[in-house]
Image (spheres, rainbow, N blue to C red):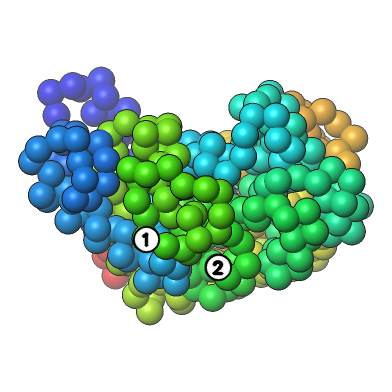
């Protein structure tokens, strides 16, 4: 590479990933094939439109790429329609609002501080600005409060309900959620960005058949490049013709919302990398991967509970744990910093009814998708839990944190990133 400044930074980030434990639950490590597709000539090509109906010439190969990605997505999730063009999760959600509701309409989503995403109606986000957003919460026990949701739907009569989270350790009950949405005839949108890989593996119930529209990012548990997909059922899409807002028209409504509604040219290199990731996710080994993510999270939870950590909801059903640190006399930011010095990357996070501020919350969030990709299993989780405890208990002891950092760096050598050569026996 001629650009030495950038080359150095890429190498440094690779080293950081290689020598540390990546435990931010929305992150993962992609395969060499995904990286190859991302770094390909496909990025040079403009192809506004959809396969077979583009505004540019020379699209024969990118058409085939996008068709493969769409077909693989449909087969993997069991839907009749997939749009693989969203640049990322947030623009995908924006397209869903644009397709299904008008400015000023009432929409409902989980409050950010209780695990929701900004695009689910946060006041300062477009979703809380252009729409009349009302927000639901979890109960004191940390579980989604279905009772509150039901009451809220009856009084607020939302036209659209987003369900999905960035910091919720339990299963979503899709059938129950659909019943709640049906009370006001709302569109039910399942945002499975965090859990898509678990859904594919059968380790979390699929929302397909219950939710009207399913959105997922492709770079979290699904282990693809940054990007997103919108999935639904209905009549074949005709993006050239306006359609009424009825369930059978969902494919057309979604496609038109992406382009011409919101985006220009698709990122063809990203589409190719999504196709590669979807093929990987269709292999039997991916089912094992998804199940191991959950097994690992459960062991980590058990071990931390033994060490007197307070977990929101008392444990986990999925890939993440939300730890309330109030009994440990340390705030989220300080725990995050100590763990980082020890070589474990997590992030500070609010816990339900957090007595502190969202900028300095009481908890931390951690997950197992990336470390499971590296081949770590139950035995390693026990070790990692004890390191986490040691780092948090010795947060102000630079010597101990440095020692942990060395130990963890050594340990990581046995678990190469997917694109790295296997370690010598
Ligand atoms: C990550 C995430 C998004 C947004 O994805 P970006 O690619 O960061 O824009 C939306 N919703 C949920 C639930 C997410 O976890």
Vertical placement of 233 versus 202: above or below?
A: above
Residue 27 showing in the rendered view: no
With 296 as the anchor, is 333 left or right in this view?
right
Q: Position of residue 360 (x, y in %)?
A: 77, 28
Residue under the point 24% across and 61% down: 68
Element type where label 2 sits in the image:
loop
Residue at x 24%, y 28% (from the top left corner): 7
Residue 265 visible within the image: yes
Q: Secondary structure at mark 1?
A: loop
Quadrant of residue 172 in the image? Answer: bottom right
Residue closest to the eye, 189 or 276: 189
Which residue is nearer to you in this view: 210 or 36? Answer: 210
Q: Are marks 1 and 2 in contact (CB under 8 Å)?
A: no
**Which quadrant: the C terminus?**
bottom left
Q: Position of residue 150 (x, y in %)?
A: 86, 56
In the displayed orientation, state which residue is furthest to the left: 58
**Disc 2: residue Cβ within 8 A of ligand 1's nearest atom:** no
The crowding category of the residue bearing disc 2, from other C-alpha atoms within 10 Å (few below 14, some 14 to 19, many at least 20), is: some
Q: Residue at x 62, y 39 (%)?
A: 101
Residue denoted by label 2: 208
Q: Is residue 285 above or below residue 247?
A: below
Task: Examine the rendered structure and indicate whether residue 79 appears above or below residue 69.
Answer: below
Residue 130, label in figure: none
The residue pinned by badge 1 equals 236
Q: Locate the N terminus by quadrant.
A: top left
């Amino acid at each position: 590479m001629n650009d030495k400044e950038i080359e150095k930074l890429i190498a440094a980030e690779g080293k950081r990933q290689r020598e540390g434990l990546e435990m931010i639950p929305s992150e993962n490590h992609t395969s060499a094939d995904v990286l190859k597709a991302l770094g390909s000539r496909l990025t040079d090509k403009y192809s506004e439109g959809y396969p077979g109906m583009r505004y540019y010439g020379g699209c024969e190969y990118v058409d085939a790429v996008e068709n493969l990605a769409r077909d693989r997505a449909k087969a993997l999730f069991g839907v009749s329609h997939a749009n693989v063009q969203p640049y990322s999760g947030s623009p995908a959600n924006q397209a869903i609002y644009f397709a299904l509701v008008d400015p000023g309409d009432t929409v409902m989503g989980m409050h950010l501080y209780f695990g929701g995403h900004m695009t689910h109606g946060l006041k300062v986000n477009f979703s809380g600005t252009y729409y009349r957003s009302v927000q639901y919460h979890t109960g004191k026990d940390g579980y989604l409060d279905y009772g509150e949701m039901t009451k809220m739907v009856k009084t607020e009569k939302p036209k659209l309900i987003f369900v999905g989270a960035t910091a919720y350790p339990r299963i979503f009950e899709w059938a129950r959620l659909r019943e709640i949405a049906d009370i006001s005839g709302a569109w039910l949108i399942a945002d499975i960005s965090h859990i898509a890989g678990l859904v594919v593996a059968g380790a979390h119930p699929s929302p397909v058949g219950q939710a009207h529209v399913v959105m997922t990012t492709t770079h979290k548990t699904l282990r693809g490049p940054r990007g997103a997909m919108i999935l639904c059922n209905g009549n074949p899409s005709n993006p050239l013709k306006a359609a009424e807002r009825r369930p059978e028209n969902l494919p057309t409504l979604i496609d038109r919302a992406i382009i011409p509604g919101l985006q220009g040219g698709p990122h063809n290199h990203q589409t190719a990398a999504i196709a590669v990731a979807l093929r990987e996710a269709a292999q039997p080994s991916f089912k094992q991967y998804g199940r191991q993510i959950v097994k690992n999270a459960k062991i980590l939870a058990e071990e931390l509970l033994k060490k007197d950590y307070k977990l929101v909801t008392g444990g986990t059903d999925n890939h993440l744990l939300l730890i309330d640190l109030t009994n440990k006399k340390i705030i989220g930011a300080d725990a995050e910093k100590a763990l980082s010095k020890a070589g474990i990357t997590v992030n500070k996070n609010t816990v339900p009814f957090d007595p502190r501020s969202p900028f300095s919350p009481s908890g931390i969030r951690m997950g197992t998708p990336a470390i499971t990709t590296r081949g770590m299993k139950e035995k390693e989780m026990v070790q990692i839990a004890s390191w986490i405890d040691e780092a948090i208990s010795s947060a102000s002891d630079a010597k101990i944190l440095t020692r942990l950092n060395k130990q963890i760096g050594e340990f990581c050598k046995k678990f190469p990133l997917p694109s790295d050569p296997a370690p010598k026996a």
